[in-house]
Amino acid sequence: MKLNIAVLPGDGIGPEITAQALNVTKVIAEKFGHELTYKHAIVGACAIDEVGNPYPDATHELCIQSDAVLFGAIGHPRFDNDPKAKVRPEQGLLAMRKKLGLYANLRPLTIFKSLIDKSPLKTELVDGADFMCIRELTGGLYFGKPQGRSEDGNTAYDTCIYTREEVERILKMAFEFAGKRRKKLTVVDKANVLATSRLWREIAQELAPSYPDIELEYMFVDNAAMQIIQWPKRFDVLVTENLFGDILTDEASVISGSMGLLPSASIGLHTSVFEPIHGSYPQAAGKNIANPVATILSAAMMFEYAFNLMSEGALIREAVEQSIVQGIMTVDLSGTGKSYSTTEVGEWIIDYIKKK
Ligand code: IPM
Ligand code: MN
């Protein structure tokens, strides 16, 4: 099969972790006889520096022409500490999501058995936790207009907007995902306060009869935040709006032991994007210490979701799992044991795949 991918490393640790994920992709393509072609493009703070735009047209063109996008991370502290900056790296990520119509962000939480003792939660709570959070990605507060400041600068506003069409398509996807898993769907909202949440709930109630085998529940987001750490095993598929999904998945990611483990797939109208859920971790940039696993697992999701190549994805997962079992881990996970560099972890995983 022909695999034509765009690689967008971005900022901070982005280039180091995507390099490992790309190497893994190359060796998988070789092993399974796929013809891989790829091109790099700039996004985020580095694109602001080079061309003044965090999501340049040339990058968008490349994404549109590719079958999948492998994405690293974006962001730079010099923008975080400057609330007055006119262009921000994050705008590049948001523009990409919007222009590619990536309305669904799939963030699966799985637990590696050999890492259970790294979880901040007790073993009995974590062992067997396995859920998928489906985050709406192109609506809500992130994109609602108006957004801005009053003329005197003393009032600021964001707008949370959802249309029926936006809510329906993400809820349908969530019902279908639940159907392929343990058949339980939790709609997370704040319907006791927000009008948008009440629209979500209304549409979920309308759709429910079409999915009679799915057990549907509604949960307020504050309660969900609590239950995710109190009893994560109760969840199968969660679906929620953009901002709630952003927050809850950071919370969920640490249950596995490190944020550096959680991959994601953003899917929608055009080319899908595969990226770790963590950020650009600027303190570690260039030090060869960042955990490449979330990005490597995002490459596994790329094989599965963009190309429907399940064995390829499964072999990447197996290699990652074995690297952890063998203790080949970066410093975020190694604890008092020996820690390995980003490249060492990547190379171990590649070696494992080659030998398989
Ligand atoms: C994420 C990130 C982004 C988001 C930022 C970098 C804009 O936190 O992908 O979760 O908030 O969506
Ligand atoms: Mn986030």
Image: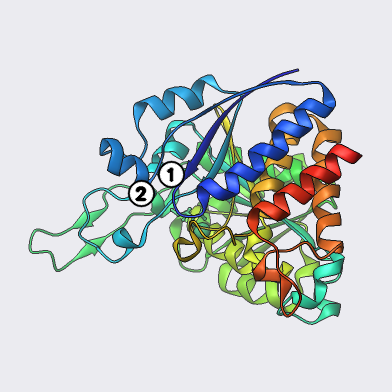
User: As displayed, is residue 319 above or below residue 173?
Assistant: below
Left or right for 167, reference 47: right
Left or right for 20, reference 352: left
Q: Position of residue 123 (x, y in %)?
A: 83, 79
Q: Quadrant of residue 34?
A: top right
Which quadrant is home to the N terminus?
top right
Q: Position of residue 356 (x, y in %)?
A: 92, 39
- Picture residue at 74% right of the left edge, 41% below the top: 300
Secondary element type, mark 2: helix
Q: Quadrant of residue 238?
A: bottom right
* Type of amino acid under label 2: Pro
In this view, the residue in front, 331 or 304, is 331
| Residues under numbered marks 1 and 2 in contact, where contact means CB atoms less than 8 Å apart | yes
- The reply to whether residue 133 is visible in this rendering is no
Q: Residue furthest right?
A: 356
In this view, the residue in front, 105 or 29, is 29
Disc 1 marks which residue? 93
Crowding at mark 2 (Cα within 10 Å: few <14, some 14-19, many 20+): many
Disc 2 marks which residue? 89
* Type of amino acid under label 1: Leu
User: As displayed, is residue 78 above or below residue 36?
Assistant: below
Q: Position of residue 302 (x, y in %)?
A: 69, 36
Crowding at mark 1 (Cα within 10 Å: few <14, some 14-19, many 20+): many
Q: Report the Cα–Cα distance between label 1 and label 2.
A: 7 Å
Left or right for 207, reference 319: left
The response on whether ligand 1 sits within 8 Å of label 2 is yes
The response on whether ligand 1 sits within 8 Å of label 1 is yes
User: As displayed, is residue 331 above or below residue 265?
Assistant: below
